[in-house]
């Protein structure tokens, strides 16, 4: 029970990595606030946690909308009185050559992936400062460290999140708040499955290509990232501050780096 009684907010936890993390954190004793835009998926996560004997509540909110995020944080404080862990996980993909990206599509990726980290942090931090305690985990990606074809907008956001993480850590260390980033490689989630289906005629070939750029023979699973998030959320990582944690099967430091 590495998160016994900790109050945890995970954005975008109706699916993929966020959902897997919500299930794991609940098994580790956390009271999990499941956030997503998609109410059906968010409620499914809560149902799965409750069926397994854990504690969770769903709050629908758009991480790009200040009033929506502020209201979510107020509801959590009213119910639990504190937020110990914030996992800024919600994100969307952006694909295409830069000169082909429509400005609206560019703005949407920036909004969800960067503003969607800024806003929950902005509204949660005052409560962590008050308690002089907190762990914030920001979802970056190994793409922040390497060049990948046709991902200019997405890579921009994940590089920004990594830079933001370091600056946040410097500012909030004095309040006993740790801020770290996760940098996953390719993790098989609905996000990636959808991308493979819509971007490639032969998804199996695409998967073989993805495997070639890592050292591990398998693609990552959401549970692999959830375990890394658990480490950053728990006191086991109390001396880990402002760090990028790679969960990428050896992409960044492997043979193709
Ligand atoms: P996913 O699509 O399975 O889940 C993302 C969730 O975020 C969805 O449930 C979606 O409804 C929610 N969401 C989207 N916009 C939102 C908004 N405005 N407000 C609230 N919720 C919103 O994706 P995933 O693969 O689990 O990815 C989760 C995070 O991990 C993303 O930030 C992604 O960029 C990052 N990531 C994923 C991979 C990968 O290979 N899957 C690799 C590196 C980083």
Image: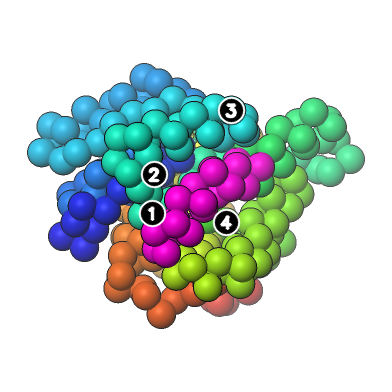
* Secondary structure found at label 4: loop
The residue lying at 30 percent from left, 48 percent from top is 7
Report the residue at 44% width, 34% height from top.
74
Label 1 or label 2, whichever comes before in sequence order: 2
Return the mark for residue 9.
Answer: 2
Give the number of the mark in front: 3 or 4: 3
Q: Which residue is mark 3?
A: 67
In this rendering, which labeled residue sits more in front, label 1 or label 3? 3
Q: CA distance from mark 3 to mark 4?
A: 24 Å
State if disc 3 and disc 2 touch (CB < 8 Å). Answer: no
Say which residue label 4 marks. 140
Q: Examine the rendered structure and indicate whether residue 239 appears above or below residue 183.
A: below
Q: Nearer the N terminus, badge 3 or badge 4?
A: 3
Q: Quadrant of residue 45?
A: top left
**Labelled disc at residue 85:** 1
Q: Marks 4 and 1, how far apart in space? A: 17 Å
Name the N-terminal-most of marks 4 and 1. Answer: 1
Gap in angstroms between the C-alphas marked 2 and 4: 17 Å
Q: Which quadrant of the rendered structure holds the C terminus?
A: bottom right
Q: Compare marks 2 and 4 and give the one earlier in the sequence.
A: 2
Q: State yes or no: residue 207 in magenta.
A: no
The magenta stretch spans which residues?
115-137
Instruction: Check disc 3 and report its element: helix, strand or loop.
Output: helix
> Can I make out residue 208 in this image?
no
- For the residues marked 1 and 3, what is the alpha-carbon distance in whole angstroms? 21 Å
Q: Earlier in the sequence, mark 2 or mark 3?
A: 2
Answer yes or no: do the residues labelled 1 and 2 have beta carbons within 8 Å?
yes
């Amino acid at each position: 029970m590495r998160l016994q009684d900790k109050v945890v907010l995970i954005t975008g936890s109706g699916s993929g990595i966020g959902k897997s993390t919500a299930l794991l954190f609940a098994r580790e004793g956390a009271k999990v606030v499941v956030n997503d835009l998609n109410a059906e998926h968010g409620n499914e996560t809560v149902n799965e946690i409750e069926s397994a004997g854990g504690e969770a509540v769903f709050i629908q909110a758009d991480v790009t909308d200040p009033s929506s995020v502020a209201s979510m944080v107020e509801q959590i404080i009213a119910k639990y009185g504190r937020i110990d862990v914030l996992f800024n996980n919600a994100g969307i993909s952006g694909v295409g050559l830069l000169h082909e990206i429509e400005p609206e599509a560019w703005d949407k990726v920036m909004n969800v992936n960067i503003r969607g980290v800024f806003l929950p942090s902005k509204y949660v931090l005052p409560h962590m400062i008050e308690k002089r305690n907190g762990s914030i985990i920001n979802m970056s990606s190994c793409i922040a460290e390497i060049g990948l074809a046709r991902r200019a907008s997405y890579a921009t956001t994940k590089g920004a999140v990594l830079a933001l993480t370091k600056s946040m850590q410097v500012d909030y260390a004095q309040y006993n708040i740790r801020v770290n980033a996760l940098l996953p490689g390719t993790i098989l989630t609905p996000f990636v499955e959808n991308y493979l289906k819509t971007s490639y005629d032969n998804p199996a070939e695409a998967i073989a290509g993805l495997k070639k750029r890592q050292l591990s023979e398998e693609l990552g699973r959401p549970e692999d990232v959830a375990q890394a998030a658990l480490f950053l959320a728990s006191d086991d990582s109390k001396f880990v501050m402002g760090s990028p944690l790679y969960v990428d099967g050896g992409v960044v430091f492997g043979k193709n780096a």
